[in-house]
């Protein structure tokens, strides 16, 4: 069994719990309101805007024997730069104020506690614990979007009667991240240190929980 296969097996329970959340299930079926979708995009913006800084921080903290991984992070950065602007453009295409979200001027446009905690955990993992642990977040975010993003975008486009330009984040990440996942698989299979492997498995489990909390918060705010 490769380390990537071990990683998936060890985190299967946490992944299944995330994928079973009502917001993810109903989003994939197109059964959510416009306000719920805008709420999702708002929280997406508040963590996606940290993707490039987190990748940069991770690269800067890797020891010399991970130079090959630092090079790969450079490729990730080129792919991920500016994606937060896609999210803001989607928010605008939904008829909401993207600049209010950017500036977080109102309660509904600011990052939730769950989003802040997930981002904080990612920075803390890189700076204090082990930069390899950041790849737990990559597994969770890219694996989830590959599984449901394209389907959710296409079904919601019809159910909410919105233009395709309101779904650039979801539609692009569904198809884009399939190639990312194979790239990710090739990278983690080169991580052979047992402590680093254990840290990555542990952090992925935590990130599944933290990312799930973002969806649970949106559900509590918009779906009850």
Image (cartoon, rainbow, N blue to C red):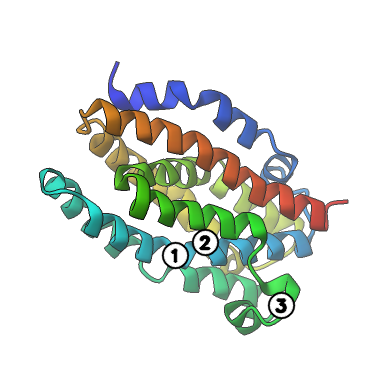
Q: Cα distance, mark 1 to mark 2?
A: 5 Å
Residue name at image x 77 percent, y 64 percent: 35
Badge 3 or badge 2: first in the primary sequence: 2
Percent position (x, y) of residue 165? 57, 69
Q: Which residue is mark 2?
A: 47
Mark 1 Cα-neighbour bin, 10 Å: few <14, some 14–19, many ≥20: some
Q: Nearer the viewer, residue 178 or 161?
A: 178
SS assignment at label 2: helix
State the image quarter where residue 57 is shown.
Answer: bottom left
SS assignment at label 1: loop
Q: Is 213 situated left or right of 208 in this image? A: right
Q: Which is in the foreground here, disc 1 or disc 3?
A: 1
Badge 1 or badge 3: first in the primary sequence: 1
Look at the image and tell me in which quarter the N terminus lies: top left
Q: Which residue is mark 3?
A: 95
Q: Which is in the foreground here, disc 3 or disc 2?
A: 2
Percent position (x, y) of residue 32? 77, 53
Q: Is residue 73 visible?
A: no
Q: Which mark is residue 203?
A: none
Residue name at image x 41 percent, y 41 percent: 136
Q: Is 205 situated left or right of 128 in this image? A: right
SS assignment at label 3: loop
Percent position (x, y) of residue 159? 76, 55
Tell me whether circle 1 and circle 2 mark residues in contact (CB < 8 Å): yes
Q: Cα distance, mark 3 to mark 2?
A: 21 Å
Residue name at image x 46 percent, y 57 percent: 172
Q: Is residue 194 visible?
A: yes
Q: Which mark is residue 50?
A: 1
């Amino acid at each position: 069994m490769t380390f990537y296969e071990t990683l998936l097996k060890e985190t299967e329970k946490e992944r299944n719990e995330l994928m079973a959340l009502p917001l993810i299930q109903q989003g994939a079926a197109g059964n959510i309101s416009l306000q719920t979708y805008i709420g999702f995009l708002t929280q997406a913006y508040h963590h996606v805007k940290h993707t490039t800084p987190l990748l940069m921080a991770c690269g800067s903290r890797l020891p010399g024997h991970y130079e090959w991984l630092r090079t790969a992070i450079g490729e990730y950065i080129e792919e991920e730069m500016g994606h937060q602007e896609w999210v803001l453009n989607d928010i605008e295409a939904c008829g909401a104020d993207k600049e209010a979200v950017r500036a977080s001027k109102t309660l509904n446009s600011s990052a939730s506690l769950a989003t802040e905690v997930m981002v904080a955990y990612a920075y803390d993992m890189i700076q204090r614990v082990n930069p390899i642990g950041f790849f737990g977040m990559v597994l969770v975010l890219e694996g989830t979007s590959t599984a449901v993003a394209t389907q959710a975008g296409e079904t919601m486009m019809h159910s909410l009667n919105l233009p395709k330009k309101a779904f650039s984040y979801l539609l692009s990440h569904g198809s884009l991240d399939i190639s990312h996942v194979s790239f990710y698989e090739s990278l983690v299979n080169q991580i052979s240190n047992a402590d680093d492997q254990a840290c990555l498995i542990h952090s992925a489990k935590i990130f599944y929980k933290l990312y799930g909390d973002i969806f649970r918060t949106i559900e509590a705010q918009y779906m009850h």
